[in-house]
Amino acid sequence: MTGNALEMRAVTKDYGPVTALAGVDLDVGRGETVALLGPNGAGKSTLLTIALGLRAPGSGTARVLGRPPVEALRAGRIGVLLQESGLLEDVRVADLVAAVAGMYPEPLPPRQALRAANIEDLAGKRVGRLSGGQRQRVRFALCVVGDPDLLVLDEPTVGLDVEGRRALWQELRARTGRGRTAVFATHYLAEADDYADRVVLLAGGKVIADGTVATVKSLVGGSEVRCDLYGGDPSELEILPGVRQVSIEGRSVSLRTNDSDATLRGLFLMYDDVRDVRVLSIDLESAFVTLTGGQS
């Protein structure tokens, strides 16, 4: 059996004239928490549905825990939380979780799944009476109740309040700490920054960056110098030492730089009136915007 939880080799997928995936290679090791990021239409959801065996790739291969995705799914080794998934309305939460647990070979006790999703207080309520955030927590309970080896989550914290998000990430961390694997797609870049061991960035159906959060940030330069500029020719900012990218909005200037010390020395030598100078480390959002060309 492979040592990886998920493997993809040269995976492609087209929808008519639209290419969703264009030769994706991906390895996800056991015990990793991997954030799948990218602008709308980058191919994230298509990649996840292929990993789950819900769609076949146009070409290439995918394997989950050493077997075809459909086999891994049928064996109960994958837990799934999709962005859009229906729930039975006229059943109580505890009964729904217990029914789904019965479909797996070695499930968690249903009460443990309710506790993992922080919904023990909702056990006796009918699903149809729950709020959107409460329903999302129920979906998470259904995702973990089978005690799967791989969790695949598409926008898992949509609609959740702070407490619900915290509970979800605590449970995911606890599971990966026991050697389980989590792959999640999200638009909440701060969550990827805080919780992912690794980031895979997609754009145009291709992997354009893959590594730790620090590695992805390093691809776009070390830091950013921001200031307000009064007087002087702003076109000369591009020739300052270390500067890789310049953004100007009115008097506000943002300089992406590999050497903030050298950039600052050159800035003060070249311009007489520079105010409100700040040096910021590159965050994941800035890296995302730069690497994807500003797509959202």
Image: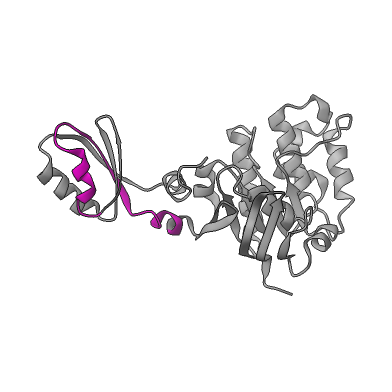
Give the residue at x 46% y 42%: 294
Q: Is residue 193 left or right of residue 271?
A: right
What is the count of numbered marks? 0
* Quadrant housing residue 6: bottom right
Give the image's coloring scheme.
one colour
The magenta stretch is 215-242
User: Residue 30 in magenta?
Assistant: no
Of residues 206 and 176, the one drawn nearer to the viewer in this rendering: 206
Q: Is residue 192 left or right of residue 174?
A: left
Q: Classify the position of the N terminus by image quarter.
A: bottom right
Is residue 188 visible in the rendered image? The answer is: yes
User: Residue 221 in magenta?
Assistant: yes
Give the residue at x 56% y 58%: 207
- List x then y, in percent, for residue 170: 61, 47
- List x then y, in percent, for residue 39: 55, 44
Give the vertical position of 85 relative to 257 (above or below). above
- List x then y, in percent, for residue 119: 73, 36
* Residue projecting furthest to the front: 17
Give the residue at x 75% y 40%: 139
* Quadrant housing residue 92: top right
Is residue 125 visible in the rendered image? The answer is: no
Q: Is residue 198 left or right of residue 6?
A: left
- List x then y, in percent, for residue 140: 72, 43
Give the residue at x 60% y 35%: 163
Of residues 287 and 87, the one drawn nearer to the viewer in this rendering: 287
* Residue projecting furthest to the top: 129
